[in-house]
Image: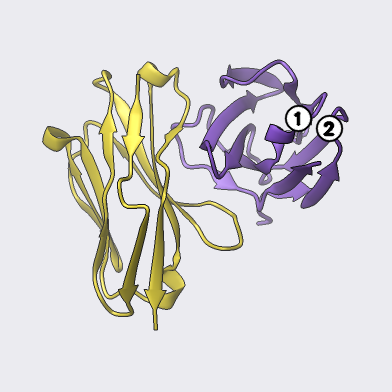
Chain colours: A yellow, B purple
Amino acid sequence: AQKVTQAQTEISVVEKEDVTLDCVYETRDTTYYLFWYKQPPSGELVFLIRRNSFDEQNEISGRYSWNFQKSTSSFNFTITASQVVDSAVYFCALSGRDSNYQLIWGAGTKLIIKP
Amino acid sequence: KAGVTQTPRYLIKTRGQQVTLSCSPISGHRSVSWYQQTPGQGLQFLFEYFSETQRNKGNFPGRFSGRQFSNSRSEMNVSTLELGDSALYLCASSSMEGVTYEQYFGPGTRLTVT
């Protein structure tokens, strides 16, 4: 069965520091999809990125970057020069045939950026 | 473009009652998925509707049901409420069938069962 582990329950950093959120997944599929979503205090989940298993290229979007490594089954998310507005809960999720194409979510990492 | 809207935003019900939650997707989106979020179980997939048909269902009892209308609006119903049904219920829409694509979430309905 598919599983997503976000071992960091809560991370607290001072503004402008870089921070990496870890995501480790388990699946028997060769084709699968990985996601990161952000949930600010308002509660509305916001899509950040989608990655399929055949695309191991790292991606950068402004201050956000993602490192996908199939060899270690990890899909880590880094925020560079963090800002207070980055404070939120971040979820990693996985979908594939092994989960009957349902989204399997990690427990989330609460990120606190202090001014 | 208007985002995903959910009504009501907050709801308090008593054990044994039933409840209906509503979700209006982004215009043009035909896929609507529902999720339950609780502190204990985290985010869990309930079901997905596409073009008025249930395409996928999570591991929830039959008390949880849903439907989708021809305008893509969706409703979720929970019958015989239990205390454990207290949760944030999130609805998401997508232009493509299935949850393996980018989804846009609504603000959620906070259900409290007493």
Quarter of the figure that contains the N terminus of chain A: top left
Q: Is residue A15 above or below residue A22?
A: below
| Nearer to us in this view, A54 or A28 | A28
The three-letter amino acid code for the residue at tag 1 is: Glu
Q: Residue at x 52, y 36 (%)?
A: B41
Quarter of the figure that contains the C terminus of chain A: bottom left
Q: Are marks 2 and 1 in contact (CB under 8 Å)?
A: yes
Residue holding disc 2: B15
What is the x, y in percent for residue A68?
20, 43
| Nearer to us in this view, B16 or A89 | B16
Crowding near the residue tagged with mark 1, few <14, some 14–19, many ≥20 C-alpha atoms within 10 Å: some
> Can you name the residue that lies furthest to the bottom here?
A115
Element under disc 1: loop
Residue holding disc 1: B82
Please state if A89 lies on the left or on the right of B105 as rendered.
Answer: left
User: Would you say residue A104 is visible in this rendering?
Assistant: yes
Please state if A91 lies on the left or on the right of A32 as rendered.
Answer: right
Rendered image: mark on residue A2: none
What is the x, y in percent for residue B29?
63, 38
Circle 1 chain:
B
Mark with earlier residue (2, 1): 2
Please state if B57 lies on the left or on the right of B75 as rendered.
Answer: left
Q: Residue at x 38, y 42 (%)?
A: A35
Q: Is residue A56 above or below residue A26?
A: below
Crowding near the residue tagged with mark 2, few <14, some 14–19, many ≥20 C-alpha atoms within 10 Å: some
Q: Residue at x 52, y 42 (%)?
A: B103
The three-letter amino acid code for the residue at tag 2 is: Arg
| Nearer to us in this view, A102 or A22 | A22
Classify residue A110 by image quadrant. bottom left
What is the x, y in percent for residue B12?
83, 46
Circle 2 chain:
B
